DNA sequence: GTGGTCTAGACCACA
DNA sequence: GTGGTCTAGACCACA
C-alpha cells in the first residue's frame, strides 16, 4: 500500500512517513491497528532496514504510532487529526510561501494552485 | 546587505541565492548593476570563496546574473520577474501543499496563512 | 572507461561530462544503470572528489543523470538523444562556423571535414 | 568599426582579433593600412589597454599585422587569405564537430546549419 | 583585481 | 557506503 518514488528528492524515510499519515487520514489505518513490521516492509519495498526504521521512529515521536517491543507497531488513537503533524505542514508551507513571495509569485497564481490541489473537496474546507 | 544564518538547515549557497533574488525583487539591484566580487563578499560574510562562487554559479544558470571573467558578476536583464525562479517556487509550493493536504490541513487554515503572508500587499495581487 | 588528459585546456569536469555522454550515446550506459560512485571514480582517475562531483552535478542539471543521495548516481531515461545536449552542441558549432566563415574558410573545405568526421556512418544521417 | 559583446563567453581579445580579421576579409582594411593605436582603440571601446594589446600581439604572431615600434600597427600583405588563421578555424571546427557527433547531432541538422550560415554566398564556395 | 578550475580534506544526511 | 555542503588554499586566464 506504500509506494516509494526513488527518483524523488524527498528522502525515502519522509515518503514513508507521509504515506502512513495519508493512510491514517484516509481511514485505511485505524487506531490500534498493527502496521507491517519494519523488516517485512523493508523487504517488500526493497529498502534498507535503517530507512524504514527511521521513518517509524519519527512517526512514534510525532505521536502517530506507538510500539510494543517484540510485538509490533500500532496506530495511535490520536493519529487522525494529529496537531503536531498539521503544525509541521503549516510551517513548511509558511517557508515555501515566503520564498515564493520573495521570488515574485503573485497571489492569484497561488490561489489557482490551491484550487487545483484542494478542488471542491469539501472534506478539506 | 546579505545575512547568513550558519545554523540554518538551508545551505549557505541557497541563502545567498535567495537573498540576491530578494534584492532584485525589491529593486535594490538593477539590471547590469555589478555585484560585489566573489572574494569581497566571501570575506565580508566570513565564508569560503567556493561557497559564494557556487551561489553565483547557480544564479547565473537560472538567468539571474551573468559573469564576465576578469570583470565581475552582474545582474541580468531578465532577473526581475524571472520565470524559472517563479516556476521553481511554485513547484516547491505544490509539494508542500499536497503534503499539507495529506496531513489534514484544511483550506481555511491555508487561506489564513496566505492572508498573513501576502496581506493586503497590492504589489503581489 | 573514462580517460582524462590532464594537460588539455578542456577542464577535467568537462572531459568527464563529454565521456559519460559518449558512453551513453554508444549504448554502453543504459537508462537507470548505476554509474561508478563519485569516490570510486575519483580514486580510479586519481582526481579530487569535488572535480568528479562537479561533472555529475552538471550532467544531472542537463538531464543526463539523476542522483539519489545515499544510493548513487544513475543514467536518466532521457539521456540518450537528450535535446539540451544536442542544442548546446549545435550552438557551439554555430559559433565555430561563423568564425570560420569570417576567416575565409570555404564551404568545400568544410564539407570535406564533415565527410571525414561523419564518413558514411549511416547511424548519423 | 569594432563591436564588442561584453556578455559573450568569448574573451574580449578574441573578439577583437576576429573582427580585425573580418574587416580584412571584407576588404575594409587593406595591406599596409594603419590600424588605430592600442590606446585609442582601448579608450574608444572602453576596454583595458592590456586586453587590446594582447589582441594585437596575437594578430602579429599570426601574420595578420606587423608593427613598427613608435609608428603604429599595419595590416600585413599576407593578411587576406592567411593560412594559419584558416587552419586554426578548421581545427576549432573539427573539435566542435567531433563533440557534436558524440552528442548525437545528425548530419542533416549539421548541413541545415551550414546552409543557414553560408547560404548561397558564392564568394565562399 | 576578478572569475574559473582544482586539490586536500572535514563533516553531515541518508540508505 | 553514497552523495551533499563547506573550508582552506593554490594556480590560471583575462581585464
Image (tube, coloured by chain):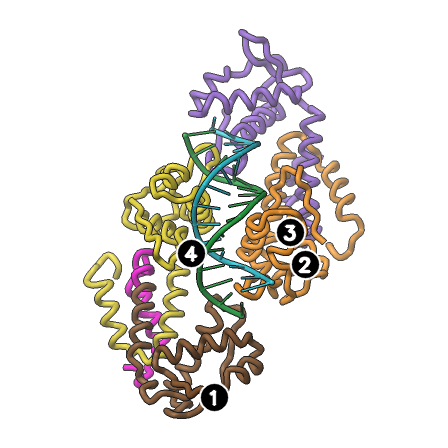
Chain colours: A purple, B orange, C yellow, D brown, E cyan, F green
Chain under disc 2: B
Q: Which mark is residue B43?
A: 3
Left or right: residue A10 compared with residue D93: right
Instruction: Specify the segment rendered in magenta.
Output: D97-125
| Contact, mark 3 vs mark 2 (Cβ under 8 Å) | no
Q: CA distance from mark 3 to mark 1?
A: 44 Å
Which secondary structure lies at badge 3? helix
Position of residue D71 measured from the top left corner of the image (x, y, whole percent): 46, 90
Work out whether disc 3 and disc 4 sit on a shared chain: no
User: In this figure, which residue is indicated by the disc labeled 1?
Assistant: D70
Q: Nearer the viewer, residue B57 or B38?
A: B38
Same chain for marks 2 and 4? no
Instruction: State the residue position of label 4.
Output: C84
Is residue B2 at least partly visible in the picture?
A: yes
Comparing labels 3 and 4, the label whose residue is closer to the camera: 3
Counting other residues with Cα less than 10 Å from the Cα at mark 1, is it few (<14), some (14-19), or many (20 or more)?
few
- In the rendered picture of this protein, how many numbered marks are placed on residues? 4
In this rendering, which labeled residue sits more in front, label 2 or label 1?
A: 1
Q: Residue at x 59, y 57 (%)?
A: B83
* Gap between marks 3 and 2 measured at Cα: 22 Å
Could you confirm whether marks 3 and 2 are on the same chain? yes
Q: What is the C-alpha distance between the residues marked 4 and 1?
A: 51 Å
Q: Nearer the viewer, residue C43 or C27?
A: C43
Amino acid at each position: 500500500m506504500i509506494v516509494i518514488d526513488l527518483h524523488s528528492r524527498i528522502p525515502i524515510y519522509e515518503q514513508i512517513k507521509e504515506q502512513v499519515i495519508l493512510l491514517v487520514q484516509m481511514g485505511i489505518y485505524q487506531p490500534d491497528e498493527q502496521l507491517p513490521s519494519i523488516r517485512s516492509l523493508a523487504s517488500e519495498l526493497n529498502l534498507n532496514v535503517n530507512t524504514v526504521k527511521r521513518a517509524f521512529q519519527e512517526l512514534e515521536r510525532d505521536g502517530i504510532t506507538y510500539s510494543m517491543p517484540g510485538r509490533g507497531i500500532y496506530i495511535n488513537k490520536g493519529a487522525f487529526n494529529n496537531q503536531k503533524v498539521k503544525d509541521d505542514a503549516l510551517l513548511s508551507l509558511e517557508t515555501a510561501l515566503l520564498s515564493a513571495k520573495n521570488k515574485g509569485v503573485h497571489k492569484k497564481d497561488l490561489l489557482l494552485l490551491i484550487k487545483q490541489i484542494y478542488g471542491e473537496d469539501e472534506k478539506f474546507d
